[in-house]
């Protein structure tokens, strides 16, 4: 009788490991941005120029107009930022792009089903983005049959995964999922040994509570989350509940100031978060929305990243589209062995 075949171990390198590239989305759906489009492009251009000093940047352009406008905006860093024409509804590559992983001795681009954040924002091209980026990176795509956005999960590289019930157990994603069913699916997809459940994400979050706006791993077993800023912070109870859950999970937890109450152009609470930072080679790029609590957040993050420079950049216009820096990026780890598909 032959030996039973065992599935190879899957490892998603954490974001603080060395990166070969950073994909960044370029906005192009004017109906999704309205008056904020050009301001968002200007903020993203500054982000790309900053990130490209540390890591090669690949810009996902979902239309000919997007390509042309990105080419104009990024003229000063064209040697460090390469434009790619890929199908993409807009900029949110964290959710529509692949999750790069090591599978045994090979590389893999884990691609999941995508339904427009529970059917709320269905944009042409978004279901093709993951496979297109995998092909551009010459990495074999591994497809999974359940719905999952990359911003809904966070990894520490040592077997732990963070997520929220509000998103993963929402019936608008995978109807009928329980914690047990979800954990089994996540363990099969990522080979994680511990799924840590937080409850609700931020108020006003169009993604139904993505964890990358709530809490982030910064080292194995070490996580950072927020505390309320100002007396009118709309997420105080949710920050406190998140902190308690992380402590109960046995993690090393540090809290930093939130941006406080940030409203959109219509006066509604916006899901502004200092958790939506991007970690890349030697840099932590922090989104900012005002001038007081952002400085305190930089001071709090600095000792947590002794090998990185904390760079605060404005992201108020990007927030008008529903997310921030982490939402619009997807890192490509620098794998020890780089095999082509």
Image (spheres, rainbow, N blue to C red):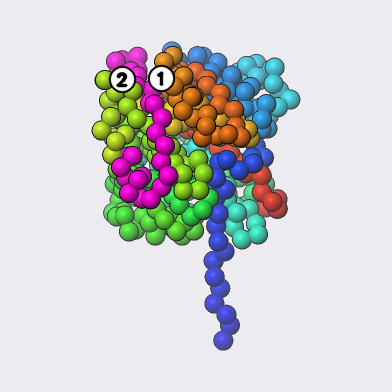
Give the image location of residue 184, x and y in percent: 39, 60
Given contact means CB atoms under 8 Å apart, are the residues at marks 2 and 1 in contact? yes
Q: Which residues are magenta?
A: 242-270
Res. 246 image quadrant: top left
Q: Earlier in the sequence, mark 2 or mark 1?
A: 2
- Residue 112 shown in magenta: no
Instruction: State the residue position of label 2.
Output: 230
Mark 2: give few (<14), some (14-19) or many (20+) Cα within 10 Å. Answer: some
| Picture disc at residue 293 | 1
Camera-nearest residue between 194 and 264: 194
As helix, strand or loop, the secondary structure at mark 1 comes to helix
Residue 65 vs 20, above or below: the answer is above
Residue 60 at least partly seen = no
Residue 120 vs 71, above or below: the answer is below
Residue under the image location 66 percent in, 27 percent down: 52
Mark 1: give few (<14), some (14-19) or many (20+) Cα within 10 Å. Answer: some
Quadrant containing the N terminus in the rendered view: bottom right
As helix, strand or loop, the secondary structure at mark 2 comes to loop
Side of 70 relative to 255 (left or right): right
Give the image location of residue 255, x and y in percent: 39, 33
| Picture disc at residue 324 | none
């Amino acid at each position: 009788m032959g030996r039973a075949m065992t599935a190879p171990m899957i490892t998603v390198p954490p974001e603080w490991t060395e990166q070969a590239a950073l994909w960044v989305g370029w906005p192009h759906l004017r109906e999704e941005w309205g008056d904020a489009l050009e301001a968002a492009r200007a903020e993203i251009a500054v982000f790309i120029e900053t990130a490209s000093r540390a890591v090669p940047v690949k810009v996902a352009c979902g239309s000919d107009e997007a390509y042309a406008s990105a080419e104009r905006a990024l003229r000063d860093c064209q040697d460090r930022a390469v434009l790619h024409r890929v199908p993409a509804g807009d900029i949110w590559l964290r959710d529509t792009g692949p999750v790069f992983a090591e599978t045994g001795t090979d590389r893999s681009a884990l691609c999941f089903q995508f339904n427009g954040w529970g059917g709320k924002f269905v944009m042409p091209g978004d279901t093709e983005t993951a496979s297109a980026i995998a092909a551009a990176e010459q990495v074999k795509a591994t497809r999974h049959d359940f719905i999952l956005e990359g911003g809904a999960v966070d990894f520490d590289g040592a077997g732990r995964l963070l997520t929220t019930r509000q998103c993963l157990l929402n019936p608008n994603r995978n109807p009928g999922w329980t914690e047990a069913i979800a954990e089994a699916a996540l363990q099969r997809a990522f080979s994680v040994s511990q799924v840590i459940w937080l409850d609700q994400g931020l108020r006003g979050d169009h993604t139904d509570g993505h964890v990358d706006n709530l809490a982030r791993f910064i080292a194995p077993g070490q996580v950072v989350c927020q505390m309320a800023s100002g007396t009118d912070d709309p997420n105080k109870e949710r920050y406190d509940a998140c902190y308690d859950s992380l402590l109960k999970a046995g993690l090393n937890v540090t809290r930093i100031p939130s941006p406080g109450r940030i409203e959109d152009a219509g006066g509604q609470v916006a899901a502004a978060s200092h958790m939506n930072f991007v970690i890349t080679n030697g840099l932590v790029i922090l989104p900012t929305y005002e001038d007081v609590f952002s400085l305190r957040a930089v001071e709090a993050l600095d000792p947590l990243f002794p090998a990185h420079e904390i760079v605060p950049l404005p992201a108020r216009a990007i927030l008008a589209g529903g997310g921030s820096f982490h939402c619009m990026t997807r890192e490509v780890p620098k794998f020890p062995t780089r095999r082509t598909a």
